[in-house]
Image: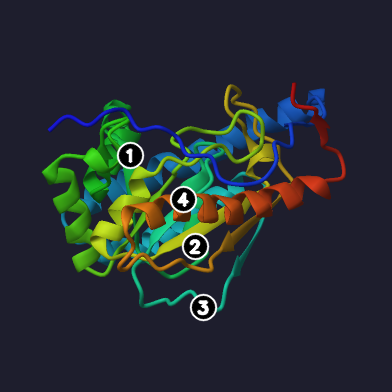
Amino acid sequence: MTAAAEVPVEGGGEELGAVVLPAPSAFDRAASFGLWGLGVSWLVPMLSTMTALHKLLPGRELEPLNRLYCWGQVKLLGARWRAEVHPSVDPAQPYMFLQNHTNHFDHVACYNATPHYKQGIELKKHFRYPFYGTFMKARGTIGVEKGQGRGQSPEVMAAMAAEVARGHSILGFPEGTRTRDGRVGPFRKGLFFIARDLGLPVCPIAVTGMYEVMRKGSLMLRAGGRVTVHVGPAFPTAGLDDEAVMALVGDVRDVVAGHVDRYWARHPTARVEPTR
């Protein structure tokens, strides 16, 4: 069955304008070069090791190594990291974790915030990336087609159901693309319907501080920022009809966008360009 391209669903709240940060200095550019060197020196041996081990061992067996990799990668970004997890988030409950999307390091920023084993969702075309694509396939990352939403193939749905049956959570990015202006974009509805169909509560994750680290359209890394991961509270999906799921899209986006907008409102150096 071929599904129509999915239409983004905007949540509530006013349009607040694009975030503009100060231009990088010569020191910032030199520091970025050094951060890339440190990051690659960590990423290459760690992902090579995990790729080989994933072919031999179940993913759960490698979770300590996976968490070590994420911890080290965040440290080597020069970021000060902390997590704020709502007390109702159950360590034993699988969730559909839905996170705002800022840059290529989003998954390592959020991973250690909770003890859940999180299986990722990735566009299938990304599996063609040298090195990283090989790692994603070895780890069992679920490949999806762009724009299909809840119309994913039976094989994709079976892969997600198998992860849930193992007690794993799913990590996805409902914006479908990285932010260009520092704000949270419209959420696509597909992952919400999939969560309902799999019997998973939806747990929002809002990460702040990553836009300063790196943003879409630039390879510039900036050290010294504070990255905060806000997790929960979760939203139940059991028994929701389609109309209620559509309402849930806006509710979850409001939670995520609320954290991000409050962060920018008190940011010491950012300014906002009015929406035209």
| Image disc number at residue 112 | 2
Label 2 secondary element: loop
Q: Give the CA separation, mark 2 to mark 1.
A: 19 Å
> How far is the residue under mark 4 from the one under mark 1?
20 Å
Q: Does residue 105 appear to the left or right of 76 in the view shown?
A: left
The first of marks 4 and 1 along the sequence is 1
Q: CA distance from mark 3 to mark 2?
A: 17 Å
Q: Is residue 94 above or below residue 137?
A: below
Q: Residues within 10 Å of mark 3 (few under 14, many from 20)?
A: few
Numbered disc 1: secondary structure: strand
- How many marks on residues? 4
Location of residue 18 in the rendering, given as x and y in whole percent from the top left corner: 72, 30
> Residue 88: which disc?
3
Which residue does the image show at 52% across and 38% down from the upper left?
A: 186
Residue flagged by tag 1: what amino acid is it?
Answer: Glu
- Identify which amino acid the numbered label 2 is placed on: Asn
Q: Which residue is mark 4?
A: 249
Query: Which numbered disc, 2 or 1, marks the residue that appears first in the sequence?
Result: 2
- From this view, report whether residue 80 is shown above or below residue 85: above
The Cα atoms of the two marked residues, 4 and 2, are separated by 25 Å
Of the residues under marks 3 and 2, which one precedes in the sequence? Answer: 3
What crowding class fits label 2: few (fewer than 14 Cα within 10 Å), some (14-19), or many (20 or more)? some
Amino acid carrying label 3: it is Ser
Specify the quadrant that holds the N terminus.
top left
Residue that label 1 marks:
122
